[in-house]
Image (cartoon, rainbow, N blue to C red):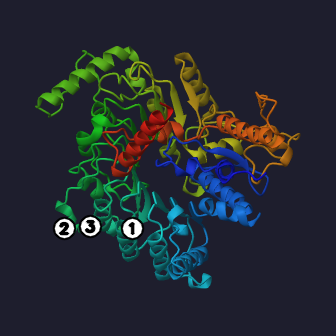
Amino acid sequence: MEVPDEILTQIFDLAADEDVIFQYGLPTAMAESAWFKNAFNEWALRSPQEAINMIQRRSYATKKAIMLTCKRWRRLGAEFLYRCLFFDNPSRLHLLCDILESDARDREKFENPSVGLGWWTRRIHLTRFYASPNRGTSMDDMCSALTTVIKHCPNLSIFIVEWLMPGATFGLVADSLFKYTRKALHTVHWKLPAESIPKVIWALDSLPLVLAAHIEFETPTASTELDEAIHLGSTQDITLNLPYLQQLTLRGRISEFVEQAIGWNLSGLRNVAFDCGYSKFDIPNVVGFLEEFGDQLTVLDLDSVPPFEIPEILELCPQLEMLSFNGDWRLQSPPLLSGGGVIEDDGPDEASSRRRRQSRTMRLSLGSHHTEMSILTHTPHPRIHTIGLHGLLHAFGFDPIGKSAFDPLRSRVTRRSNDLNFAALNRAQFPQLRCVRVLSRPLLINLNKEDGPKQDEGVEGLDRYNRWWDGCVDMGVRLEDATGGELGRLPQDDDNEDDDEYSVGYSSGEDEDEEWEVDVPPVDSDDDPPHVIELRQLIKECQAMAEDRDESPFSQFIGPAFRPTLSMAGPAELRIEEEEEEEEEEEELGSD
């Protein structure tokens, strides 16, 4: 007896294991990294994006094996092979372009009413590579091939390009996205020159159903740091209407873009990340942006060299649950005088007076310890339960720059700021605090390389770690590293295992059998033929595998926030819900 096509399709879907890569949200700074053994048998960290790329490569290998099994599996597996298009070699993109064009010509020649291969595509991901004449690929060729592929993918919902697209190339790609995928596209990831900001604004204006956007503008070099502002032209007065946008990540030279976004309609925005890189001059108007959208945010990630006004920011974000900032910032606050008063500033308005009273109240609540910590809030924040810290590269005695550029005074000042900022993560300022996560992967790699913090003359790395750890334990707060594990718990070599869950490559067949081994309940009826019993057992095994599948490491950050309600659903989501309701009504009528 042949297994029905529907059963095989479900099995192929489970084997492809692509649930994570089809989530609309993008990994945030809080997404967990993972230890693995590299080709030199050394421990290294795999970033969340690298983990997703590895999943796509592994899934492609599985789907390719399915396609090569037999003609029937090839016919059924085509849907899964073209569902996700992942490229790290530009020449493959040209090959795909030829395949899609040939398929379209054949269907037109034979008047085949079936859908094309590109109809199944939901995700296109181009990872980093360098286009050069030596590889037979120019940027113009890449642009032509990419626009052709987009033309054949009307159901494309996730579009990620990690390599730098010139302005002319991006213009053609954005036009193709608008023309062929505007009703289906929900997630975009672009990397562009800073002068392409006007084109990005027009592109977003043509894609009103976008849920998540990661836009990286190339950081200016030192010679162009003080150049005049970018000319925005007609986009300076345009007001975008993006009511479904829930996650916005901006990186690089972003001040002009943020200034324009202040006047847009972003009523659904919940997750914001601003990363200014190493620029000391191009600082976005974060406070102005949060005055418009801060009251609805639940996740905020800020990383830059110059500090932002954290107390002002937290006052504008009452619903915030996760906060990330640079632990190296020198956060200044008005000093408390010996008489109990606070030095007055020049702000005569009522808001400034209220903040002064709130700051004084916060200092009085902290008692005599207020000088030993930064003041991060005017009043205790009622909802923040997780805080992430960027930076901290000097905290445990490591030199992230190199001995030739090492500045002892600067390192000492930075460590002092680390202590003040970490001490501010307490119950007095954050009553709901449950977790503090150190986000720096280079710091974690150094800890593993040196087998823990340094403790030398003038360097109190180990003492600082013990103080931070004891402080968190006393408060009942979990102190984590970038992997989500406890800070200080480093990977250990195990001679009894040749391959662990983080190592590169595939596990052995015995390990896979043990991992997926489940107890299948007995069949209720003994009168069924053997082939029916076998089919039922196969279905139950598939169901058990689905139930035991590990949860996505990103689900707590990008999963729940990207389930649009009926009031926020776009046309496609509303149409799907209407069809499901009609099917339920038909089933009820049939049962009656």
> What is the spatial separation of the Cα atoms under label 1 and label 2, in whole angstroms?
25 Å
State which tag comes first along the sequence, 1 or 2. Answer: 1
Query: Which residue is found at the position 34% from the left and 53% from the top?
Result: 209
Numbered disc in front, either 1 or 3? 1
Question: Number of labelled discs?
Answer: 3
Query: Which residue is found at the position 55% from the left and 16% from the top?
Result: 474
Asked whether disc 1 touches disc 2, contact meaning CB atoms under 8 Å apart, the reply is no
Numbered disc in front, either 2 or 3? 2
> What is the spatial separation of the Cα atoms under label 1 and label 3, in whole angstroms?
30 Å
Q: Position of residue 393 (x, y in %)?
A: 55, 44
Q: Secondary structure at mark 3?
A: loop
Query: Which residue is found at the position 34% from the left and 44% from the top?
Result: 569
Amino acid on which the number 1 mark rests in the picture = Tyr
Label ID, residue 234: 2
> What is the spatial separation of the Cα atoms under label 2 and label 3, in whole angstroms?
12 Å
Q: Is residue 334 left or right of residue 484?
A: left
Q: Is residue 71 above or below residue 514?
A: below
Q: Is residue 130 above or below residue 75?
A: below
Amino acid on which the number 3 mark rests in the picture = Ile
Label ID, residue 350: none
Kindly identify which residue carries mark 3. Answer: 230
